[in-house]
Image (cartoon, coloured by chain):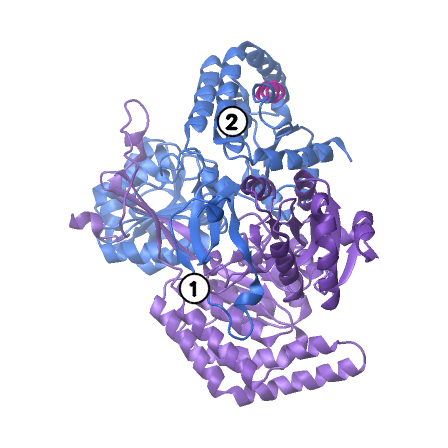
Chain colours: A blue, B purple
Amino acid sequence: MTDTETKITQAQSAALELANISAEARTDALHAIADAIEARREEILDANETDVAEAEELLAAGEYTQAFVDRLKLSESKLESIVEMVRSVAGQEDPLGKTLEARRLDDDLELYKLSVPIGVLGTVFESRPDALVQIAALSLKSGNAVILKGGSEAAESNRILYEIICEAAAEVPDGWAQLIEAREDVETLLERDDAVDLLMPRGSSAFVEYVQDNTSIPVLGHTEGVCHIFVDEDADLSMAEDVAFDAKVQYPAVCNAVETLLVHESVADAFLPEMVARYRDAGVELRGDARAREIAEMNAAADEDWTTEYGDLILAIKIVDSLDEAITHVNANGSKHTESIITETADRAERFMRAIDAASVFHNASTRFADGYRFGLGAEVGISTGKTHARGPVGLEGLTTYKYHLEGDGQLVATYAGEDPRPFRHEDFTGEWSPGRLSEE
Amino acid sequence: MTDTETKITQAQSAALELANISAEARTDALHAIADAIEARREEILDANETDVAEAEELLAAGEYTQAFVDRLKLSESKLESIVEMVRSVAGQEDPLGKTLEARRLDDDLELYKLSVPIGVLGTVFESRPDALVQIAALSLKSGNAVILKGGSEAAESNRILYEIICEAAAEVPDGWAQLIEAREDVETLLERDDAVDLLMPRGSSAFVEYVQDNTSIPVLGHTEGVCHIFVDEDADLSMAEDVAFDAKVQYPAVCNAVETLLVHESVADAFLPEMVARYRDAGVELRGDARAREIAEMNAAADEDWTTEYGDLILAIKIVDSLDEAITHVNANGSKHTESIITETADRAERFMRAIDAASVFHNASTRFADGYRFGLGAEVGISTGKTHARGPVGLEGLTTYKYHLEGDGQLVATYAGEDPRPFRHEDFTGEWSPGRLSEE
């Protein structure tokens, strides 16, 4: 076994123990981690300086961008917000041990569906060292062991943060968090479907796609967000203008920003000139289809513009003849992330929202609301454009699964089968699992 | 595009429409399918005779087993139970359009989490022609399009059943069910992660494993069921004997039958002789470890016996020193399917049930209860030993996902961000999504 294989196997054993420590022990460990990061911030900043110095050399050599180096760099205030984030995860409601269903199958035969951790999470994340802390905190809160693979450019920062986390969480079963560092380690991770239960890759679309294509482990995440806003024939045009502006300009780098604006042809003349002027004032580059360009001056959109996530102050604009054309365009070109219709007519909103296949469909609201915090999910684990397990913004619940507990007093299946079988009762009830329950009655 | 690629793409378009037809239309179509199968049973039996005749030639040539040919063969009474099954699926509660959560993010900003179909299901199933009808019925009930790939030995039976289903469900969007037939078509199916949302393979462990290893589409299913019963030190030994007998003998061919019996050393002398005699009378071959063989006569178990799903009247027996040894053995050798402890002590049951990582953990009950019907899930879609999306016996709910609907009146994220952000309310409430709701208030 290589080192990495051993680490993954250790995480697998730790996961079995971690699943059964109390909510209090997990919360206490998270507070201890927050305190330790606070206490040892000098060490962290020193390690980070080493990473940043190396990155700056590569920046000078033209290999890194300034934005990349900025993301890597920690500061007192960044560390403070990391500490706050860990305390906020600690304060979340416990996602484990919830009774999701309780059903009496027969007299003294009770079935309970309980929330439990998934097991071992595999994560590969971008250069920000805060990602390591966030992922470790979410894993611990949800009782999951975790394999952490950060970028090599953050190696020193990740090592010290990992060390601090493991030391502070000394009461948690040893081995629950594992740091892997080499690029080849990712290959090993993707192959271990015997030990890793869920992968959470973060990074470029190309990287997430690479992970999806090269593993049989379930993947939670999204490759891209090509989100649309459709301004319908009877939209409140002033509302449409504000929403479309917010969805592009408020924070263009994120996956829930709008990338294509669809405008119903009957309002295009009234809507576009003012909208275009406002975008232009904010420095947004516009790329329109032929009809949009007849109404306002903008660049010409090419075919690939309809499926591009710009992540920048660029927006594609298309005029459509009908609600149906808008729906067809979105289903063909969207990424099943977040789609919004601006309309005053309820049944047109309903048609759009039902017909669009996306994790989030909005009526008269900015696509930027698609976010775990804004949705009220507490801590956000990520946004998923997959359609199984968890979809859209994912909270801690997405890091749990369930287990069936059946309490009996010696029941046999033979009793319920064959000639004259005993019928089941199958009555849902409200109650908590306790293995002593039946004998106490 | 090959024929198969075209079929998969057609299913993808049909899925978008099928997601939005009413519950009544889906139920009506299921009743029409049941009626049509009833009305056209002569045609079905004729087609099936052709398949059976060919299979019997291969049986004579030694290529097929009698059990294989028996599974392939339809009869009037088998057809009757197929018709009943379709009507029972039609009668299930509708799994779609349920409001799973409703949350007021702010005044006039309401979030709804609604159950929706997954999209396109890909299924590959064994020789029984009833599997085609069952899978098509479950897919239609849950609003999913489906790709059906049956065995070539059932080609004629599958073709006529498929034709009858499509004709009877004429009101359902065309293309929702697609039949593919060639072995190469399976490769095509596994590659279409752009169009297929969930795979449900049925068949041998080796086949399910092959599917899991050769696709990036999520897979719902199980490779094997290596289930255990642990007879603890203070078990009611008469209960233990009945349960262990039921779990092996009542139906040994199924995945929830027990394969290894673990016995606490302190009760082994009292328990084993009678248990062994009873198994022997029922024709069960026993394979024990050295200590079990000292107490009762049986064959010797080899290492591979501890991880083998016999699916037959064979059982491995091992004596363990403690509850912890039982837990360690099960977690190391089990298949995360169903595990049962027989004990009179509540806290020992609790330790076992919490520490074992399996979809179903039982206290004083036969492992054979792990089944969608017995659990009261209504129609059973399958049993999953995966840990994400759906686990254990899976009902129609396992064929659904969810979608977030957000109703606003023009809210912008900018309002809730930056200096002096407006706070969210995040209050859960009880209500149904309706896009006209806000303007009516």
Q: Position of residue A101 (x, y in %)?
A: 43, 50
Q: Which numbered disc, 2 or 1, marks the residue closer to the eye?
A: 2
Q: Which residue is mark 2?
A: A25
- Provide residue B14's location: percent of width, then percent of height: 45, 66
Please, which chain is the residue tagged with disc 2 on?
A
Amino acid type of disc 2?
A: Ala
Q: How far apart are labels 2 and 1 at the CA level?
A: 44 Å
Residue B331 or residue A239, whichever sits in front = B331
Vertical position of residue B80 compared to residue A310: above or below: below
Segment colored magenta: A157-165
Residue that mark 1 sits on:
B143
Mark 2 on the same chain as mark 1: no
Quadrant of the rendered structure where residue A16 is?
top right
Q: In the picture shown, does residue B285 fall above or below B67?
A: above
Q: Chain of mark 1?
A: B
The image shows residue A62, relative to residue B262, as above or below, that is above
User: Which quadrant of the view contains residue B71?
Assistant: bottom right
